[in-house]
Structures are given as C-alpha cells and as structure tokens.
Amino acid sequence: MTIDVLLVDDHPLVRAGLAGLLSATEDVRVVGEADDGAVAVTQARALRPDVVLMDISMPGTDGIEATRLILDEGFGGAVVMLTSFSDRTRVTDALAAGAVGYLLKDSEPDDVLAAIRSAAAGHTPLDPRVAGALLPSRRDAPGADLSAREREVLALIAEGLANKQIARRLDIAERTVKVHVGNVFRRIGVADRTSAALWARDNLPPA
C-alpha cells in the first residue's frame, strides 16, 4: 500500500527536503504541498491524503487551527505535527486539535518515515522529547476525555477486533477507525493494541 502524504510548511526549503526524502521510498509519496494552514485545509479536502505532515508556526492560519479545521470536516487521514517547538502548550494544543503525532524538525529522516508509516497504520508517533510534556497531565485521569465513539472503538479493540472489523461493526470508514485508535492510544497512554485491551478490561465498565 502506498501512503499518500500532504506536506504543509511555509518554508520551501523544508518542503523540498521532505519531498526529496519521501520520494526516495517505495511506499510513501507526496501528493501535494501547502505553504500555510488555509491552503492545507483546501488541499486536504481535495486530495484526501493518508497523512498530513503539518508545521505549527505559519503566517495566517497556523498548523493547530488548520488541523482542527481539517478534522472537523470528517477527514479520514491522520495529521502529524512536524515543528521546532516542544513546549507543553503547543504539544497539548496540537493533540487536542486532533493530531495523532508530534515530531521535531531535527528528527532523523528514518524517524520521520517511521512516524508517517505509524500514523497511517493508526498509531500515535510521538517524539520521546515531547512525550514527557504530554504524559504527566494524562496520567491524572487516564481515559477521562475519551469520547463515546472512542470508548466503543476501545471496547472492540479489547474484543480483539482489527480496524477493518471495527469499521464494519460501527459502520464507519476504516480510516476513521485508525484516527480513533490513535486518539485512544494517546489519551490512555499506551502504544499498542495489547496494552489498550488490558487497559480497557481494567477501566471500562462492563457492556
């Protein structure tokens, strides 16, 4: 499967570098580029990429607001932030807007590729350097901010269902399931389906 990626950054040199990196792979391709958040929203709507690689600091509509707007439209892909900022406020704001991943721009090329593949697979790629800014606040009441749909998805993960089976059970798109799975993992502080299932059995009320 080829992963379609939309690159969003106001610096042409950054976009060119990322495009060069991704074009050297067989399973990832760049389907579009945007130099600000407003254009990113339009491009995401038209191109429906699997992953949006999103900068935060841009003139006009910034990456956090663009992420919120894209996901409010029912976008079935995943948004991964790629930025220079690692402060707690921006990390939490980006994830609250719906981003499933957060990377820093000095990440190794292989880590960027791994994050894109991870996000496309429904996981939550977080740079270890920013994870510490997120997890302490989440551990106070893990899972407290799960939506009703995310709780449904989590319960089906606990039953051992794959994303495709969950999509059929809930009558939603598989891409939408991937987004929900990534959000669930982030909100309960786990990194894989087995840990999520164990968490669900300990913390979700019986059906």
Image (cartoon, rainbow, N blue to C red):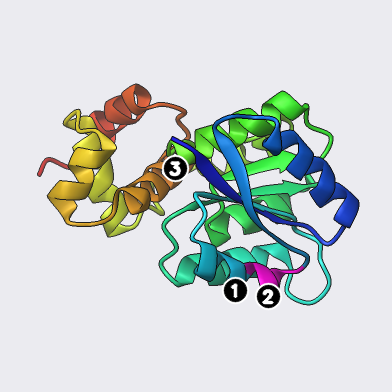
For the question of whether residue 125 can be seen, the reply is: no
Please tell me in which quadrant of the rendered image residue 8 appears.
bottom right
Q: CA distance from mark 2 to mark 3?
A: 25 Å
The residue that appears at 39% across and 43% down in the rendered structure is: 184
Image quadrant in which the N terminus is located = top left
Q: Position of residue 145 (x, y in %)?
A: 41, 54
Q: Is residue 171 above or below residue 83?
A: below
| Residue of label 3 | 182
Q: Which amino acid is tagged 3?
A: Gly
For disc 1, the marked residue is: 42
Q: Considering only order in the chain, which callout, 3 or 2, is on the residue closer to the N terminus? A: 2
The C terminus, quarter of image:
top left
Secondary structure of residue under mark 1: helix
| Nearest-to-viewer mark from 1 and 2 | 1
Q: Which residue is denoted by mark 2 in the rendering?
A: 38
Q: Which residue is at 74% across, 31% downward?
A: 129
Q: Amino acid at mark 1?
A: Thr
Name the residue type under label 2. Ala
Highlighted range, magenta: 36-40
Q: Residues within 10 Å of mark 1 (few under 14, many from 20)?
A: some
18 left or right, relative to 70: right
Contact? badges 1 and 2 (CB < 8 Å): yes
Q: Tag 2's secondary structure?
A: helix
Q: Are marks 2 and 3 in contact (CB under 8 Å)?
A: no
Please tell me whether residue 38 belongs to the stretch shown in magenta.
yes
Q: Main secondary structure of the magenta part?
A: helix
